[in-house]
Structures are given as structure tokens and as C-alpha cells.
Amino acid sequence: MNNKRTRIYEGKAKILYEGPEPGTVVVHFKDDATAFNAEKKAVIEGKGVLNQRISEYLFTKINEMGLPTHFIRSLNMREQLVREVEIIPLEVVVRNVAAGSISKRLGIEEGKPLPRSIIELYYKNDKLGDPMVTEEHVTAFGWATPQEMDDIVHMSVRINDFLSGLFLGIGIRLVDFKLEFGRYYENDMMRVVLADEISPDNCRLWDMKTNDKLDKDRFRRDMGGLVEAYQEVAKRLGIIQQGEIVERSLKLVKND
Ligand code: UDP
């Protein structure tokens, strides 16, 4: 494709390039998978395409709900155009059912529904291994203002209600997920917008009937079948047709 693009940043699963107009960024979804703060790594062909398409679908719906996001449009199977934002250094985890770190930390059996949805905050810092923090830390250290935290919590609750219902409709339990937010300056106005991605890389999605994991835990826990699981999510959302295989999408990308 266009090799003259300026690379702004390369992360674990995505590369950011300067966008075609000021204030825009191109996000390229890689096939790289990492877990446990990048101690475990692999390349899983087809993952980037599936994540891009699932995230495009979910961000479009969230935009349609009237919640602001960084998403503008997809450019091809692997890339999307987004608004340039200043990332707020927080990982906002929303949980409906106990799994992963909350199960370990508090000794709650995986799969146990939580008495109510819980929002947790983690300080986004790889060197420190993304430590859990409270709103007190966030506002005291100035990572976000109290008003921004209000917007973040309010949007996270609405996104959880919306996504839980959407996945319920296709036989999937939304166990938990992680969101990131950014600041977007529109004229002199600053607002908080949803950023990053929503895909099986940062959600726990369990089949309602079988409890099969349709998310990145397949990689974290060496279960195999990750692309097949992500494809299943995309099929149920109606993003890819029954029979459409990722290899086809990959060929289209390679011919770019
Ligand atoms: N998560 C994520 N990035 C992270 C940590 C967590 O996307 O750096 C997601 C993860 O996929 C899960 C949810 O946030 O859907 C809760 O993760 P948890 O705290 O249980 O941590 P984990 O077990 O993944 O270490």
C-alpha cells in the first residue's frame, strides 16, 4: 500500500499512521497477539482483520446511539480512519460476571454473575504492569478531571447495557470488557470520546449454551481455535457471511 505514510506509533496489536487530513489518524490492526504484559507473543493470521471488522461494527452502533467515539470510517479490511485524540491513560474494565483477575484477586469462582456490574480503573502503564487505581488516584494525579471521570463512567455504563443486550441477542454472554477514552478538541470545546477498539481481544465473550470462550482467553490459556472463535462472533453479528472465510479477506488485504 502507501509506504510513504508516517508511522506515529507501534503498539502491541496496532500501528498508528498519520491520517490524510490534519486531526486524523489511520489505525492498522496487526495479527500480533500478546498477553501477560507481552511476555507471551504469537502471530495469528486473520486476527487483525476480524478485530477491525468487529470493532468497526460496534463503534458504528455506539456512534448511532449518540455516544461520541474516535471512529470515522474503515479504509480497508485492516485499517480505519479515526479522529486524533489525546488518550486518557486509563483502562476502564466493566464486569458483569466474575472471570480473570477479579476471580483470582477476590477468590470468586469464574462464571459467577456479579451482584451488579462493576467498573474498575487501571493506570495504563506497561512498565508498572497497568496497576489498579481508584478515582482518587486518577483525579489527584491529574490523569483525568472529576468531570471527565463522570463522562467516562456514564458512557461505560451505557456501553455495557447496549453491548450486553446486543450479545445476548446472538447467544453470547458479555462477561467483561476493557474500554479506553480520549480527549477530542472540537473548536475550543473539549470532549471525552470512546477510543481504541472493542473486539474479542479486549472482551470476554462466552457462548450462552455451551460456555465456550469466544475471545482472547483462547490464546492466554493455550486453547487454540482463536480465529475460528473470532469468526463465530463476526458471523453471529452478521458481519461475515456463513462460509466467508478469513483467507479471502487476507488475500484482499495482501493485494492492497
Ligand atoms: N483487558 C484488556 N487489556 C488489558 C487487561 C484486560 O483488554 O490489558 C480486558 C480483558 O480482555 C478482559 C477484561 O479486560 O475482557 C478484564 O480483564 P482482567 O482484569 O480479568 O485481566 P486478565 O485476566 O485479562 O489479565
Image (cartoon, helix red, strand yellow):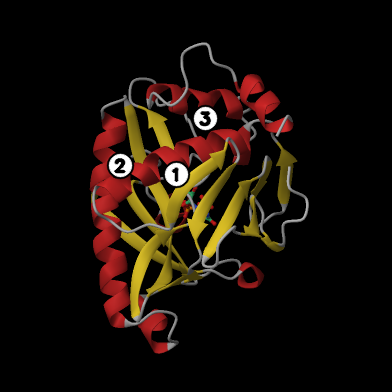
Of the two numbered discs 2 and 1 in the rendering, the one whose residue sits closer to the viewer: 2
Give the amino acid at mark 1.
Cys
Give above or below for 252 relative to 119.
above
Q: Earlier in the sequence, mark 1 or mark 3?
A: 1
Q: Name the residue under label 2.
A: 163
Q: Nearer the viewer, residue 76 or 213?
A: 76
For badge 3, the amino acid type reads: Tyr
- The residue labelled by disc 3 is 230
Q: Give neighbour class at mark 3: few <14, some 14-19, many 20+ (Cα, 10 Å).
A: many
Image side of residue 236 versus residue 130, left or right: left
At 31% from the left edge and 48% from the top edge, which residue is drawn?
62
Real-space Cα separation, disc 2 to disc 1, in angstroms: 11 Å
Q: Residue lying furthest right in this view? A: 3
Most extreme residue toward the bottom is 140
Whether 107 is drawn above or below 119: the answer is above
Q: Which callout, 2 or 3, points at the residue further toward the start of the chain?
A: 2
